[in-house]
Image (cartoon, grey):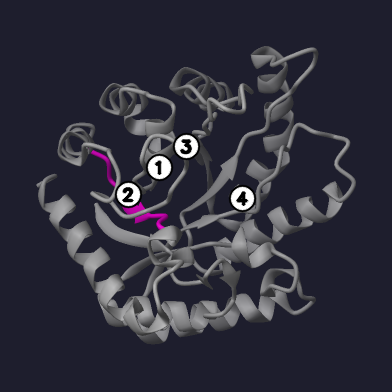
Amino acid sequence: MRLSTSTNIMDRYQSIQNKITLEECIKACAKAGYKVLDINFCDMSNEGMPLTFDNWEEWVDSIGELGSKLGIEFSQSHSAFYNVCDMTIEDRPWREELARRAIIGSAKLGVKWVVFHAGTVYDNGFSAEKSKKSNLEYFAPHIELAKKVGTGIAIENLFELPVERKRRYTGTVEELIDIVDSINDSSVGICWDFGHGNLMGIDQNKALRQIGKRLAATHVADNSGKRDDHVAPFYGKIDWAPLMKTLKEIKYQYDFTYEIHNFTNRMPIELRETALKHSVEIGEYLLSLAK
């Protein structure tokens, strides 16, 4: 396991995106001691962001050159997401174009796993059976594209907030395992989001053992158990020590990747360097528990 972080750790200030550019984020992460990054194509797909431009491939190439210069490896990415099972979304073709760009861009950067969200079918209420069928149809062409360009897809566990009273497909580990096993392709795995698991009240040690070798990527964040806070480990209520031992037990071989943008979102820019170094120290401590 290696410590990694999503590039969204630095890409906003007071919730205003691009106050700090992706390029500046990569440089700051490298200076803080990160060697591996998850490029957040999700944020880069927002209006006015680089993945939406006509010259997006040139931009991706420039990011690759910067990473190479700084000794940074890009091992994960996150595609733009929406309810992929909702066929009524008006800008669906554009969202799908952004997903295509995320896959191709990931391959250009040498990314091993592109993280995707599954969708949910609501047909007179939640339907797991129809959701699974819809997702299998949805993912098929994306999986083929990913294989063609040399990367893979990791499907993430989602969550439901009690106030929403609305089920989401892959909110349970059983649904997540079922769809990945049904796809039955070595280029498709699971991304486990610890924050989402905590919100669902899941026994995450048991879930990780169930997932086993299917685990291809991680989203590491802590929370209070009430909302998806996306803060650093030990700043929420997750018990991390047993989880690190479980990751060792199942012989997880990929990266331990932060998704903690709210840890730095409100922090003054002058303190970001200190915060980034602190996040590295936390990560190194956690990884030491898995040795």
Percent position (x, y) of residue 254?
32, 49
Report the magenta residues as a range: 251-260
Q: Earlier in the sequence, mark 1 or mark 2?
A: 1
Secondary structure beneath dot 1 equals strand
Query: Within the magenta stretch, is there residue 46?
Result: no
Which label sits in the foreground, 4 or 2? 2
Q: Is residue 266 left or right of residue 278?
A: right
Nearest the eye: 136 or 147? 136
On residue 189, the disc is: 3
Mark 4 or mark 2, earlier in chain: 4
Mark 1: give few (<14), some (14-19) or many (20+) Cα within 10 Å: many
Residue under pointer 4: 146
Q: Residue at x 63, y 67 (%)?
A: 44
- Left of 49 or right of it: where is 33? left
Residues 123 and 177: in front is: 123
Question: Mark 3 or mark 4, which has the lower sequence index?
Answer: 4
Question: How far is mark 2 from mark 3, CA to CA?
Answer: 11 Å
- Say if mark 1 contacts mark 3, CB within 8 Å: yes
Placement of 156 over or under 266, stated as above or below: above
Tell me the distance, in whole angstroms, between the alpha carbons under discs 1 and 3. Answer: 5 Å
Amino acid carrying label 1: it is: Ala
